């Protein structure tokens, strides 16, 4: 997850009495005590998770670990679905409401990345240690706390470790969960833990469409074959046109060319070249406008290159693929789930900020299902870099906030 814009909101100055009274509930007090007593164990678990590689599309080993841990923690009906999501249930008095509490298994790093955690004082360093091993560690901590305090619930919680949240994973785990999996149509609320931090409540889904444009030509020698169509020239025209697009400030809309590849040598006309393009907006209509502009300019650029070098007798062949589509949307700040998150934050002394980001919550939000993403506590930095770090300072407050939010949503039984 990467948050991109913040939104001011007038918050009540103090939490409502219902949330304050929840902290005096005997089972909640036991759970909070468990959080305090288990700090060292939580850190050890966090490190174990991080040192199990989970590169894009290869989350199986980490998924197997979570299936084992879910079973050890006595969740019901623990299983891995057909896409790779790991699911287990903490049953309540009834099956409804059915709350999904989730964290994503995958990282952005390739298979060969060294993931051994290095300790430097209180800080832990390793790729993925924050995003999203912090969220995954919190997922297990919630289950352990519910067990330790013998919390009785009105509704049921499905704990889910999802696949494919990052990059070209295209939210495939969350997409399957809500559209094809056996829980589709049954989930009433969704909460995901993504990365460290305690302030942000992501209730607005940042939509994106990602394209890979691949162009093929005959190639040749830069001197003797000069004048034949060149894939990189056409890509250059596309890049220049996209860079001139003037997006609105509101709704915020952005674009990026993240990668251009092609060619073999400085004196070789490339046979093939491709580029990856990222288009984003908080508004589906504005995103569609940007997408239409990009696709039209791509067509024009290819035609221009072919026309300019028609005498060569060759034309570029194009393959334009949509490699990612994340829907946008917004859960109202007045919705019960957002209000619970605000109130739970204030109850433990957090001053929350509503924001917009691209997370697993994009899928349920786009389907009209109440969904938010929150940080799992602690602090961190350098997300998506090899120098990523995490420190558990503030983790306990984050865990307390998360538990109060969960219990407010699903309901707790009186002892």
Image: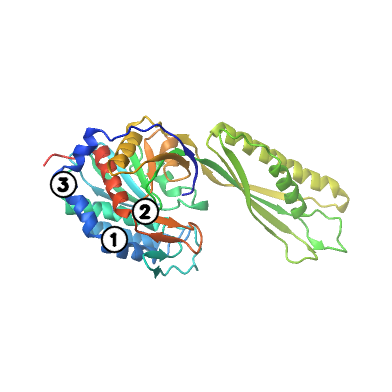
Q: Which element is circle 2 on?
A: helix
Mark 3 or mark 1: whose residue is earlier in sequence = 3
Residue 44 placement (x, y as % from top left)? 30, 65
Is there any visible trace of residue 167 in the rendered image?
yes
Badge 3 density bin: few <14, some 14–19, many ≥20, Cα 10 Å: many
Name the residue that disc number 1 marks: 42
Badge 2 density bin: few <14, some 14–19, many ≥20, Cα 10 Å: many
- What residue appears at the point 69 percent right and 44 percent down from the top-left corner? 243
Q: Quadrant of residue 401?
A: top left
| Image colouring | rainbow
**154 or 337, which lies in front?**
337
- Decide if residue 321 is on the left or right side of residue 269: left
Tell me the quarter of the image containing the C terminus. top left
**141 or 54, which lies in front?**
141
Residue 112 placement (x, y as % from top left)? 50, 68
Name the residue that disc number 2 marks: 135
Residue 199 placement (x, y as % from top left)? 39, 45
Name the residue that disc number 3 marks: 27
Badge 1 density bin: few <14, some 14–19, many ≥20, Cα 10 Å: some
């Amino acid at each position: 997850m990467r948050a991109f814009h913040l939104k001011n909101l007038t918050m009540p100055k103090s939490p409502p009495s219902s949330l304050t009274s929840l902290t005096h509930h005997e089972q909640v007090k036991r759970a909070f005590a468990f959080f305090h007593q288990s700090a060292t164990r939580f850190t050890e678990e966090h490190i174990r998770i991080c040192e199990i590689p989970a590169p894009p599309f290869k989350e199986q080993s980490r998924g197997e670990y979570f299936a084992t841990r879910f079973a050890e923690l006595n969740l019901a009906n623990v299983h891995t679905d057909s896409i790779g999501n790991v699911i287990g249930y903490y049953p309540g008095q009834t099956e409804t409401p059915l709350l999904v509490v989730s964290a994503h298994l995958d990282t952005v790093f390739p298979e060969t990345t060294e993931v051994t955690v290095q300790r430097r004082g209180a800080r832990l360093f390793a790729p993925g240690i924050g995003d999203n091993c912090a969220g995954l560690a919190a997922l297990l901590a919630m289950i352990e706390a519910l067990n330790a305090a013998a919390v009785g619930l009105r509704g049921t919680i499905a704990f889910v470790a999802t696949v494919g949240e990052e990059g070209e994973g295209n939210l495939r785990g969350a997409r399957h969960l809500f559209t094809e999996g056996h829980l589709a149509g049954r989930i009433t609320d969704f909460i995901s833990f993504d990365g460290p931090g305690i302030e942000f409540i992501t209730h607005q889904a940042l939509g994106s469409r990602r394209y890979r444009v691949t162009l093929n030509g005959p190639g040749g020698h830069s001197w003797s074959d000069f004048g034949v169509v060149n894939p990189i020239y056409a890509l250059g025209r596309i890049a220049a046109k996209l860079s001139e697009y003037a997006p609105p400030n509101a709704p915020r809309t952005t674009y990026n060319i993240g990668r251009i590849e092609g060619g073999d040598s400085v004196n070789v006309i490339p046979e093939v070249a491709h580029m990856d393009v990222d288009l984003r907006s908080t508004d589906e209509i504005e995103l569609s406008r940007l997408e239409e502009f990009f696709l039209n300019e791509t067509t024009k650029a290819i035609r221009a290159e072919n026309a300019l070098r028609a005498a060569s007798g060759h034309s570029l062949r194009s393959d334009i693929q949509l490699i990612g589509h994340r829907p946008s949307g917004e859960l109202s700040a007045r919705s019960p789930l957002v209000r619970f998150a605000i109130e739970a934050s204030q109850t433990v002394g957090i001053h929350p900020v509503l924001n917009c980001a691209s997370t697993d919550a994009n899928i349920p939000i786009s389907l009209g299902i109440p969904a938010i993403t929150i940080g799992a506590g602690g602090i961190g930095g350098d997300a998506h870099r090899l120098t990523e770090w995490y420190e558990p300072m503030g983790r306990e407050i984050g865990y307390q906030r998360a538990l109060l939010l969960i219990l407010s949503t699903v309901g707790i039984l009186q002892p």
